[in-house]
Amino acid sequence: MIARLSFALLVLVPSLALAVHPDAAGCQEPPLFSRMSGHWIHSCRATPFDAHKVFLGDRRKAREEPIEGPISFTMYQWDNSSGARPSQLQVIRNYQNAAKALGGEVLYDYEGRTTLKVVKRGVTYWADVSEYGGAVSVWIIEPKAMAQEVVGNAEAFAGDIESSGHAAVYGIYFDTGLSVVKAESGPALVEIAKLLSTKSSLKLRLVGHTDAVGGLEANMKLSQARAEAVLAALTGQHGVAAARVSAHGVGPLAPVETNATEQGRARNRRVELVAQ
């Protein structure tokens, strides 16, 4: 679930009476922004992982890009008892100014819809805000790779290695910028150990890959450290002989997808098993 921020910023509006209509049951303010005065929450929902398309670029050449991760959606309605309803432009400018005040940027702005991006305390947030006829829709997405619950098994890894000489493993996890293997990596490590157990003559290079965020030298060191951490986990916790595995890091030098999207970067962060 998206972490709630204690620095939520009140959007600036002229003095208006607070809405008197009660919010929908179970709803509260979404991450990042508070509401415009005079509005009440009509509906809301949150998902731990999904995709939402945002508009990017100039309005005449706009493109849609799906952003994956935890998502919250909040729809506000104008309370007619609150006086004169703010214009569509007033609503959109309020959210844009609030994002800018948090150090963010406006990535799309056209006919009552805007895309905003804010990075705060190392966490990236995308916002898709629209206003039509007094209804304000606010989508907040925190780009994040899905927690992979299904991992390739030893048989699948063996098939990939036999056919192409390597197999990609996406079930090994690290915190951003760190090389400590997380506990939820256990199932993938078990399958790698099983592969080596069933293929007694197989020796593997454990090759760490990163995305292209950050400097090349830092990513090269990080990928090497992560590969070494996987090696240590296999030999220290899963009984793999040290002579059968070696660790290597290639940083962002062998991407499988573009690094221009969140989804591509998630695919590029991986460990590969390469037959020696």
Image (cartoon, grey):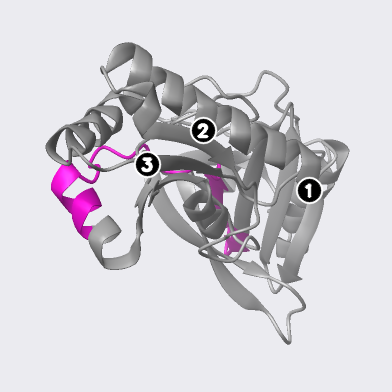
Disc 2 designates what residue?
227
> Is label 1 in contact with label 2 (beta carbons under 8 Å)?
no
The image shows residue 84 at horizontal and vertical percentages of: 71, 52
Kindly tell me whether residue 71 is visible in this rendering.
Answer: no
**As displayed, is residue 215 above or below residue 121?**
below
Q: Residue at x 73, y 87 (%)?
A: 60
**As displayed, is residue 273 above or below residue 242?**
below
**As displayed, is residue 37 above or below residue 167?**
above
Q: Which residues are magenta?
A: 130-159
Q: Earlier in the sequence, mark 1 or mark 2?
A: 1
Question: Which label sits in the foreground, 1 or 2?
Answer: 2
Q: Quadrant of the N terminus?
A: top left
Checking the image for residue 204, the label placed there is 3
Q: Residue furthest bottom?
A: 60
The image shows residue 54 at horizontal and vertical percentages of: 58, 64
Question: Which label sits in the foreground, 3 or 2?
Answer: 3
Q: Amino acid at mark 3?
A: Leu
Q: Secondary structure at mark 1?
A: helix
Q: Residue at x 67, y 67 (%)?
A: 112
Checking the image for residue 94, the label placed there is 1
Q: Earlier in the sequence, mark 3 or mark 2?
A: 3
Q: Nearer the viewer, residue 2 or 145?
A: 145
Q: Secondary structure at mark 2?
A: helix
**Is residue 163 rendered to the left or right of residue 78?**
left
Q: Secondary structure at mark 3?
A: strand
Spatial distance from mark 1 to mark 2, Cα to Cα? Answer: 47 Å
